[in-house]
Amino acid sequence: MRNKLAGKSTGKSKSAKYFAANPEARAKKNAYNKEYHSSEERNKYRAKLNTANRRAGTYGNGDGKDMSHTTEGKLVKENQSSNRRRNGKGNNKQKK
């Protein structure tokens, strides 16, 4: 089943434009991401969230929800867009 939310973007961000214009920078970023996201720590983190999504019944059903971390350390259901928008890039990490 295809992801209903895929391909809904209407424009390009600054970073997307930069990486489109600089293929060597994109290759460097992709190499870093490949190493980072394949680490043991990231795998465990992702598995924990996937398990929580499955238990909550939101995994793969296209409802636009995923699990969000609260300041108390709990996991709660939240819209994907709200959760991912808030967590931003760099040092702009916040919890619900």
Image (spheres, grey):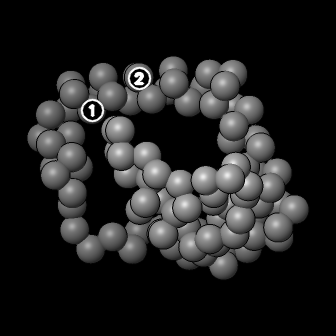
Give the image quarter of residue 96: bottom right
Is 39 or 91 nearer to us in this picture? 91
Locate residue 79 relative to residue 48 in the image: left or right.
left
Give the x, y percent position of residue 6.
48, 68
In the image, residue 23 sits, relative to residue 12, either above or below, namely above
Give the x, y percent position of residue 10.
26, 74
Give the image quarter of residue 55: bottom right
Is 25 or 76 nearer to us in this picture? 76
Is 52 or 92 nearer to us in this picture? 92
Is 41 or 26 nearer to us in this picture? 41
For badge 2, the amino acid type reads: Tyr
Residue at label 2? 32
Q: Which mark is residue 53?
A: none
Give the x, y percent position of residue 76.
71, 65
C-beta proximity under 8 Å, tags 2 and 1: no
Q: Is residue 23 visible?
A: yes
Give the x, y percent position of residue 17.
16, 50
Residue at label 1? 26
